């Protein structure tokens, strides 16, 4: 410790000027020395180093740091990078460390650690070896010897780049007969079969049935290496398909099942039924506001459910796409606003298209061209709102730390009902003299 403290200015300068080389030097040290360096290193520099470390080694080191230190590091790196490190830890240690993190970061990291039931992410193991592509063969062999006591399977080693993207695989035989001075990049196999962490079990069985692998690497949508799926584990027993998000979207408890007790089901459903009742009265109050115009032009009542219903259907389409994007982590940082505007623009197109058809039917049916215009305009406004809110609601709920699947449909239906009624009846008021 004293030696490290004495050399700290030089060590800091090394990490500042050439972080990648400094990380390689850190990996070559005995664990005790590497831990000593990280303890002395400022959190900002340690945070630059951790995403570049071999993931298993990073997990080993972070366990030895103080609570304050590892919290500082994890707050400065991307949540997916922190999750990749936590994946290497035993469950009890992982949960203990995650519980020490700030609530927002804890939620973000847990999201990356959670995969749907029966997906590759749930079935994979993180008990594997990976190395960076620029490490020499002799250093890899030494590291494998040092890690032997961990009982990590060593039939294959996976090769990653500086951002943890999977770039190759190394056969142990090829490693042992290669020149000690060459890097892994020169001997690795680059043509790799991978599976996405969200691939469901049925698709996995179908795909792997055509191949003779006993294990395959699991990656995310950006090809970050997450774990390894052993085919033997895949073929063991079938669990019940997860339906939690579907239940939550319609106001049932995520943990409710067909054999749940009546009391449990009522307790889970009743609060949301009251929420739905309150929102229904909100929509009804909008209609009541326009009671006089409806009394004068009763034909308007015919098209109220048409305009509102079409908005609800269009909003549900947007909601489903965004919910899938959130669950599958397809929505990257900064894309949320762009997605909302995209769905809003689609609402303009679909609103004009379906509104024109509905307006034409109203015109021909009741021989009132301005009724067709009112229906058309109401439909356009409601479908724009449906697209915007269908994309925004789940993202807003996620942003405030709530489950985006929790009753999104109830909230969206309320909005499309209120906007649809208000737009349609509002235009009816504007064109009242042409409708009577």
Image (cartoon, rainbow, N blue to C red):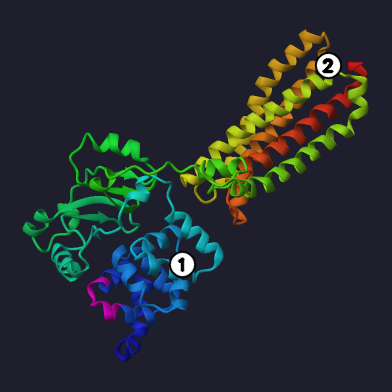
Q: Quick one: 77 or 311, which is closer to the camera?
A: 311
Percent of width and height locating residue 39: 38, 81
Q: Residue 61, located in which quarter of the rendered image?
A: bottom left
Q: Residues within 10 Å of mark 2 (few under 14, many from 20)?
A: some
Residue segment shown in magenta: 27-34
Q: Quick one: 216 or 141, which is closer to the camera?
A: 216
Secondary-structure class at tag 1:
helix
Disc number for residue 98: 1
Magenta span includes 190:
no
Could you tell me how far apart the alpha carbons at marks 2 and 1 are, in whole angstroms? 61 Å
The quadrant of the picture occupied by the N terminus is bottom left
Circles 2 and 1: CB distance less than 8 Å? no
Residue located at (58% from left, 32% from top): 317
Magenta span includes 29:
yes
Percent of width and height locating residue 200: 37, 40
Which residue position holds label 2? 370
| Mark before the other along the chain sequence, 2 or 1 | 1
Give the answer, above or below, for where 142 lies relative to 434.
Answer: below
Give the answer, above or below, for where 385 lies relative to 159.
Answer: above
């Amino acid at each position: 410790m004293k030696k490290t403290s004495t050399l700290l200015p030089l060590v800091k300068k090394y990490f500042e000027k050439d972080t990648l080389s400094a990380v390689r030097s850190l990996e070559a040290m005995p664990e005790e020395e590497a831990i000593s360096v990280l303890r002395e290193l400022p959190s900002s520099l340690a945070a630059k180093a951790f995403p570049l470390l071999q993931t298993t080694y990073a997990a080993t080191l972070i366990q030895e740091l103080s609570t304050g230190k590892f919290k500082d590091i994890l707050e400065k790196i991307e949540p997916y990078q922190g999750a990749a490190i936590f994946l290497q830890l035993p469950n009890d240690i992982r949960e203990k460390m995650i519980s020490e993190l700030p609530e927002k970061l804890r939620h973000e990291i847990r999201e990356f650690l959670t995969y749907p039931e029966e997906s590759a992410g749930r079935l994979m193991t993180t008990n594997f070896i990976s190395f960076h592509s620029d490490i020499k063969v002799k250093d890899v062999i030494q590291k494998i010897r040092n890690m032997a006591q961990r009982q990590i399977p060593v039939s294959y080693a996976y090769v990653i780049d500086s951002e943890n993207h999977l770039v190759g695989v190394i056969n142990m035989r090829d490693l042992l007969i290669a020149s000690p001075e060459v890097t892994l990049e020169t001997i690795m196999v680059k043509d790799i079969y991978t599976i996405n962490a969200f691939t469901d079990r049925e698709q996995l069985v179908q795909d792997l049935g055509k191949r003779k692998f006993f294990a395959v690497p699991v990656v995310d949508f950006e090809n970050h290496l997450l774990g390894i799926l052993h085919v033997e584990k895949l073929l063991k027993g079938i669990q019940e398909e997860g339906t939690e998000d579907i239940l939550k979207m319609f106001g049932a408890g995520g943990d409710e099942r067909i054999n749940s007790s009546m009391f449990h089901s009522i307790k889970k459903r009743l609060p949301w039924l009251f929420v739905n009742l309150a929102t229904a009265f909100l929509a009804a109050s909008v209609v009541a506001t326009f009671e006089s115009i409806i009394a004068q032009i009763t034909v308007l009542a015919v098209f109220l459910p048409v305009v509102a219903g079409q908005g609800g259907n269009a909003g549900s389409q947007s909601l489903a796409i965004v919910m899938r994007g959130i669950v599958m982590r397809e929505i990257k940082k900064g894309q949320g606003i762009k997605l909302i505007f995209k769905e809003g623009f689609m609402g303009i197109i679909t609103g004009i298209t379906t509104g024109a058809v509905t307006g034409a039917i109203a015109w021909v049916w009741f021989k009132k061209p301005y009724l067709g215009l009112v229906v058309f305009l109401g439909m356009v406004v409601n479908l724009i709102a449906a697209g915007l809110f269908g994309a925004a609601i789940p993202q807003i709920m996620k942003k405030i730390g709530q489950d985006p699947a929790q009753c999104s449909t109830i909230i969206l239906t309320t909005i499309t009902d209120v906007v649809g009624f208000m737009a349609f009846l509002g235009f009816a008021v504007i064109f009242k003299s042409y409708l009577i």
